[in-house]
Amino acid sequence: MSRLALRATTAKVTAAALGALTLVVGCGGGGDDGGSDRGRRPDGAQVTIRVPGDAPTISDAVSLARPGDLVLVAPGVYRESVKIDTARITLRGESRGEVVVDGQLQRPNGVVVTAPGVAVENLTVQKNTQNGVLVTGSAAAVAGLPGSGGYDTGDEPVRLLKSFRVSHVTATRNGLYGIYAFSAQNGVIEHSYASGGADSGIYVGQCKPCRIVVRNNVSELNAVGYENTNASGELYVVGNRFVGNRVGLTTNSDHQEKLLPQRDTVIAGNLIADNQQKLTPVQADGGWGIGVGVDGGSENRFVRNRITGNANVGLMITATADLTADRNRIEGNTFTANGVDVGWTFPTATRGQGNCLRGNVLRTTVPAGIADTASCTAPATSPTPSGSWRSQTAPAGIPFTDVAAPGPQPEFPQAATVGPTAVPDAPALPDLADVVLPPPSLLATGARVQIS
């Protein structure tokens, strides 16, 4: 947009802010107006900027917003990349399926959040060459500098973006990740849907302590449903449906990211099933038919998940050449109809210790009998046994652009009428006592896990 056009748009929003725009009295405000007439709004007022009524594009509206404002987007296809670098803005679509940020396979990211306290709600992001929604404190990630894996930021120091919310977002057919929280903490990803991610549908990476809650999401038809790399401390993945990917969920350590090693994630109350879907993008390092994979991650807890129908293995623990996997606890899960329910396989040099099982329903393990020999009553320094099993050959996949389009998804309640979302400095963390084993009925197509 030219400078002249931007001035015209600013003038339009200024006039509307004094007249037709919705003003919500609250604690928004603050910050430098840069000499704009928008400073005439009442002190402490929060403005609703409507797209396209008050600004022609989402990016224009975001550039005019101040902390505490709501950018409310009408149905339409918006062919742009939106960067939110002002704190405490809410970006919300009036209709989740009909407000579409479309990258046209030309732009790397759909929505990029680089400021704290931002909420992204009730819209669809699709067909970006990298990510649907990127939330990050990394300038290199924003610039699209990460390497082929999507996350190598070179010598850049770690800067964690603090506080965010992604809710009721549909992220589909993106070339790397659907919803990507990288170098960020104190956030929530919830009630969202991810498909067609050429690497993973939802990804949390490079945070410590994370204090992130990933809950009540559906991730399907991706290379990996959910991925967690070098993300440690107060990270809860609860009540999600990871069904019909190539790999359901991974938690791992990787030298391509900082804050090694990965540890201390709670994965509880999830449905992780049938992760050998052929009509998915090929990635996942060739992974196929795996429900849960732990690669060099330690001190994680897997509690009351239903892990079923994964052709290779339900839950696998392994290690990298120099990063072991220690003291992972597998407790109260139900495993059914997997190739192997629980399998541990380690390189000789990095064999783990203290990995244990307690109170699970399962049929087969590799090595055999580890439910008894590697009980969680054993010392935390007990050597973890290792074995091997025959894996199925992964079939050819499809381009991420060819993944089936998603159907309708649940709407954000009263999206067009409620005010902006106040994102807390840190989210409330789940109480594991409230997380239950998902019932078998949730295997039905479209059924959803719900955790309050």
Image: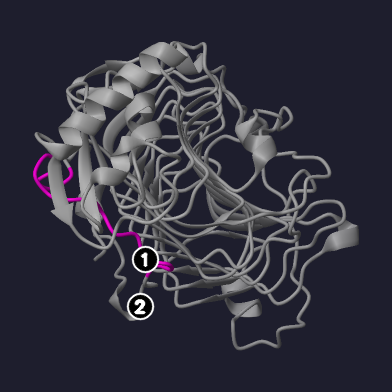
Magenta stretch holds residue 422:
yes
Image location (x, y in percent) of residue 59: 38, 26
Which residue shows up at 72% across the image and 50% down it? 388
| Residue tagged 2 | 431
Seen in the image, is 63 located left or right of residue 112? left
Label the magenta part by its dominant secondary structure. Answer: loop
Q: Quadrant of the C terminus?
A: bottom left
The quarter in which the N terminus is drawn is top left
Tell me if residue 236 can be seen.
yes
Q: The magenta stretch spans which residues?
A: 412-427
Which residue lies under the disc numbered 1? 424
Q: Is residue 166 left or right of residue 134?
A: left
Given residues 405 and 324, the one toward you in this image is 405
Q: Is residue 438 above or below residue 448?
A: below
Residue 120, above or below 399: below
| Callout 1 amino acid | Pro
Quadrant in the rendering for residue 238:
bottom left
Rendering coords of residue 233 (x, y %) = 58, 70
Q: Residue furthest right?
A: 349
Q: Give the residue drawn at x 52%, y 11%.
A: 106
Comparing 353 with 373, the one in front is 353
Helix, strand or loop status at disc 1:
loop
